[in-house]
Image (tube, rainbow, N blue to C red):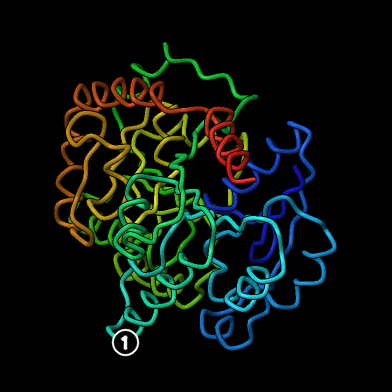
Amino acid sequence: MRIGLVIYGRLDTLSGGYLYDARLMAYLERQGDKVTIFSIPPGSYWQSRRHQPGNRLIPAIEAARLDVLIEDELVHPAVFGLNDHLGRAANFPIVSLVHLLTSFDAHPVYNAWLYRHSEKNYLKSVDGLILNSRTSLQQAQSLAGDELPPHVVAVPAGDNFPQVKIEPQKIPDHMTAPGPLKILFVGNVIQRKALHVLIRALRRLPRDDYHVTVAGRTDMEPKYAKQVKQLVARSGLEGQVVFAGPVRGAALAELYQTHHVMTLPSSFEGYGIVYVEAQQFGLPVIGTTAGAAREIITHGENGYLIPPGAHQVLAGWLKRLHVDRNLLLTLSRNARGAYRQHPTWHDTCENIRTFLETLV
């Protein structure tokens, strides 16, 4: 098949959504498919709505003589005109790859109505959907209703460290050793990932008992990142919170192996690949009840789910895990067991390719 993918910016951008896109494209190429990436310059939602940069791709897309075009759903503000044109002129299906529906994030009332209206119409403009979770499917159904196009749910995988040797026999000693509870936050420092909730939780705890490593970019929402760092300074936590910047590959695996728990108290997650990655290394995960974290985390069994913004609740669970290292070890073992139930990237991508073949 000749397959195109429309994205914002570069495919090697550090985020779970781009990782999913990159894994899928690499798999398709290994199957002998010809993959073409069509990039739209990143911009604000309103800039993309107004200028419709996707329209400038029409000649390149038509020249590629595609069998199917995949659009990362995040580009939907930019491709209304493109889909309208291709729907009239092209003879290939357009498929949206849904990582996160903007409509279900927190917005002011007017913006929320506009996002919902835009995404509802966008979903009607495509011929198929690839959804990263059951949560995303339910949200798409609430937007499109009976007009939801053919779809497949293909959850992301966590097997992103093929060169790293994991030694499960070392996990019990690591989890039960005395010392500070080492907390890992893997995510870009943006409002939705809610690092401020973790910092506020730490303010309620004895500072020397907890250390946090933040693995993620700080340049995506500079104003928010500055506010978080100011909160760390005002709280006297500079010695307990380390900003490691963007971390990939073996360096990220090392962080998973040297920490005790992964905490990502996002206001919303379409799925959360880092939750699955953490489970691979035996880390219990603390997420929130908003979004798809509940598809990965079983509360009280392999981690905990807290209400969004509930820093007091988060502080309570962190304290319990620090004090009760046997509980931490039990959750760790259960996390490893949960990881083994997840599909691999091969499984996920094979499922998607089969779906694309049915559309073509």
Q: Quadrant of residue 163?
A: top right
- Residue 305 is situated, as x and y percent measured from the top left of the image, at 21, 45
Q: Residue at x 41, y 46 (%)?
A: 272
Q: Is residue 252 above or below residue 72?
A: above
* Image position of 271 (left or right of 25): left
Q: Residue at x 38, y 64 (%)?
A: 192
Q: Foreground: 33 or 115? A: 33
Q: Foreground: 141 or 202? A: 141
Q: Residue at x 39, y 30 (%)?
A: 279
Q: Which residue is mark 1?
A: 110
* Image position of 58 (left or right of 191): right
Residues packed near mark 1 inside 10 Å, few (<14), some (14 to 19) or many (20 plus): few
Q: Is residue 130 above or below residue 110?
A: above
Q: Residue at x 51, y 79 (%)?
A: 45
Amino acid type of the residue tagged 1 in the rendering:
Tyr
- Residue 39 is situated, as x and y percent measured from the top left of the image, at 72, 65
Q: Is residue 23 above or below residue 108?
A: above
